Image (spheres, rainbow, N blue to C red):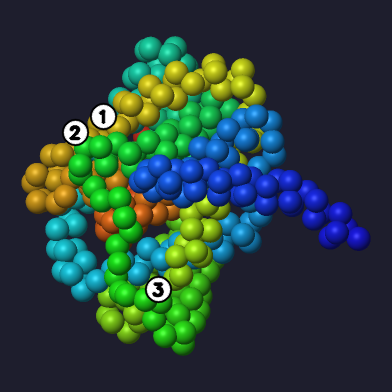
């Protein structure tokens, strides 16, 4: 009986938001929007959450979705992708300039223009690594609710707006790459799913940032890049994954009142614009120096989460392996240096 009693709650908090999100994704798809299924699902499910609905993605479903999409993204890797890795050191070095510049720009805006206290402005400015940033925020004097809303809304804007902006600027594709034709033999497909899922779960147990997605993507990339596997995940299954990811991001807004959101809306938009402006400037310089496509570098540098940005890279045909690798390096760098940076910027009695 307890399990049956949970079923209506599951339908209300997960199945219904996914159905609504799928409708939003389909509408965006019919309108020809880039990254339609994910961004459409995100926008509609976010409205649902802000309207007071509970939106909850069960942990096992979230993990399965990350494994699925990691497998999908790895299928875009080819031998040519591996050869292009020679240009990565230059773009990786650009992160050392990008991250401090984003933090400085957003902190300055939030503190000077929006009049947030310095601790809150600082933690709200950190690009990505939200769970780690929130852990440090809770141990400081910063307003954790303001940090969470500003960080989450910035991610929503990135996923919803960035594909369209890149498309309008004609610096990115709008279709997922076709690494092979057809689904491939079923034994290959089963091998792909088994190996990618196993490696993704192993990476997650090792506490690797975005472990399920990153591990599955690496395993799938090796299998496809070496030609051992040509099978692809069926498109309807990919669409389900994109819809669930949109709902997963939207779930961050469940329980946030409209009054509270209005109070922080301008600050969130301003932080987003400041972060994107810095990202575009640094990405343009790195793209010119390294001879890389600008759109790909912008996605690799965009101040969002590992999973969301790598998935966007896949649906926009912008080398998800490149984008994912840069976000992992940024996450690790933040994890290692944020405590020191907080003490330097906020002082020893405020940074922790």
Left or right: residue 58 versus residue 212 is right
Quadrant in the picture for the N terminus: bottom right
Q: Which residue is mark 3?
A: 232
Residue at 42% over, 38% down: 160
What is the number of the mark on residue 333?
Answer: none
Residue at 40% over, 73% down: 232
Q: Which residue is mark 1?
A: 277
Of 272 and 177, the residue lying toward us: 177
Q: CA distance from mark 1 to mark 2?
A: 6 Å
Q: CA distance from mark 2 to mark 3?
A: 36 Å
Number of the front mark, 1 or 3: 3
Label 2 close to label 3 by CB (< 8 Å): no
Q: Is the residue marked by circle 1 packed among few (<14), some (14-19), or many (20+) residues within 10 Å?
A: some
Identify the element where label 2 is drawn.
helix
Q: Which residue is mark 2?
A: 281
Identify the element where label 1 is drawn.
helix
Q: Is the residue marked by circle 3 packed among few (<14), some (14-19), or many (20+) residues within 10 Å?
A: many
Q: Residue furthest front?
A: 30
Of 44 and 104, the residue lying toward us: 44
Q: Is residue 135 above or below residue 215?
A: above
Left or right: residue 34 versus residue 51 is left
Of 99 and 262, the residue lying toward us: 262
Number of the front mark, 2 or 3: 3
Q: Is residue 312 above or below residue 97?
A: below
Question: Residue 344, percent across and down?
Answer: 36, 29
Residue at 42% over, 34% down: 157
Question: Residue 283, percent across and down?
Answer: 20, 41
Circle nearer the N terminus (1, 3): 3
Question: Residue 178, percent across and down?
Answer: 30, 67
């Amino acid at each position: 009986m307890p399990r049956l009693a949970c079923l209506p709650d599951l339908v209300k908090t997960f199945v219904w938001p996914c159905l609504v999100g799928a409708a939003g994704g389909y509408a965006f798809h019919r309108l020809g929007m880039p990254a339609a299924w994910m961004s459409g699902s995100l926008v509609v499910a976010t409205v649902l959450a802000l309207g007071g609905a509970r939106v909850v993605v069960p942990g096992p479903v979230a993990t399965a979705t990350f494994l699925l999409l990691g497998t999908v993204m790895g299928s875009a890797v080819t031998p040519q992708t591996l050869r292009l890795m020679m240009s990565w050191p230059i773009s990786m070095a650009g992160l050392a300039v990008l991250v401090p510049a984003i933090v400085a720009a957003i902190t300055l805006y939030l503190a000077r223009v929006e009049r947030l206290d310095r601790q809150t402005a600082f933690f709200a400015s950190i690009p990505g690594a939200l769970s780690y940033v929130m852990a440090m925020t809770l141990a400081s004097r910063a307003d954790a609710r303001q940090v969470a809303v500003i960080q989450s809304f910035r991610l929503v804007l990135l996923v919803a707006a960035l594909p369209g902006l890149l498309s309008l600027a004609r610096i990115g594709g709008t279709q997922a790459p076709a690494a092979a034709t057809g689904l491939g033999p079923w034994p290959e497909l089963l091998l792909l799913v088994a190996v990618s899922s196993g490696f993704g779960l192993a990476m997650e147990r090792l506490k690797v940032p975005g472990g399920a997605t990153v591990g599955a993507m690496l395993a799938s990339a090796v299998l496809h890049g070496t030609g051992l596997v040509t099978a692809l995940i069926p498109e309807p299954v990919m669409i389900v994954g994109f819809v669930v990811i949109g709902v997963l991001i939207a779930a961050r807004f469940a329980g946030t009142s409209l009054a509270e959101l209005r109070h922080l809306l301008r600050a969130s938009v301003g932080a987003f614009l400041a972060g994107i402006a810095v990202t575009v400037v640094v990405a343009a310089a790195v793209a010119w120096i390294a001879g890389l496509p600008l759109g790909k570098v912008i996605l690799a540098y965009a101040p969002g989460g590992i999973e969301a940005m790598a998935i966007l890279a896949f649906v926009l045909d912008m080398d998800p392996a490149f984008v994912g690798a840069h976000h992992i390096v940024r996450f690790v760098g933040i994890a290692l240096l944020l405590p020191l940076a907080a003490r330097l910027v906020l002082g020893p009695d405020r940074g922790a």
